[in-house]
Image: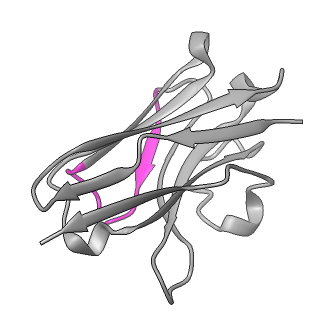
Amino acid sequence: QVALVESGGGLVQAGGSLRLSCAASGRTFNSLTMGWFRQAPGKEREFVAAVRWSGSITNYADSVKGRFTISRDSAKNTVYLQMNSLQPEDTAVYYCAGTPSGSVNTMARGLYPYWGQGTQVTVSS
């Protein structure tokens, strides 16, 4: 079993940056592909980014490419999402998730069995 706890959300002005962290517990963390999803009010939860267990392979939604960077520190059992050039449309609850799938192209939320509780990111214009 894997438990995930996100932190680092908050309020930021457009053009600003935030770094989200996801601390994981559980012996299988280092074998999981880890992802970030987000859900804005009234919208479906959508894929943002994923990183393979090795940390060397990543995948991003088109809407965040070039602005967000996902990374992981296996020694600390932590996954990060560095978010730059934030825009009001990035406002959402951000969730960390884990999947035993070895592919960072696993973007369907139903294929991620492990989820954190979410952290709110609000970008003001």
How many discs appear?
0
Can you name the residue that lies furthest to the front here? Answer: 11
Q: Residue drawn 39% across and 63% down?
A: 61
Q: Residue drawn 81% across and 54% down?
A: 113
Which contiguous range is marked in magenta? 56-67
Q: Is residue 62 above or below residue 16?
A: below
Quadrant the C terminus occupies = bottom left
Q: Is residue 60 left or right of residue 85?
A: right
Residue 59 in the image, given as x and y percentages of width and height: 44, 49
Residue 46 in the image, given as x and y percentages of width and height: 52, 71
Residue 90 image-quadrant placement: bottom left
- Magenta region, main secondary structure: loop
Q: Is residue 22 left or right of residue 18?
A: right
Tell which of 71 and 115 is nearer to you: 115
Residue 56 in the image, given as x and y percentages of width and height: 46, 27
Residue 89 image-quadrant placement: bottom left
Q: Is residue 47 above or below residue 116?
A: below
Q: Is residue 82 above or below residue 67?
A: above
Residue 13 image-quadrant placement: bottom left
Residue 20, can we see it?
yes
Can you name the residue that lies furthest to the right here? Answer: 1
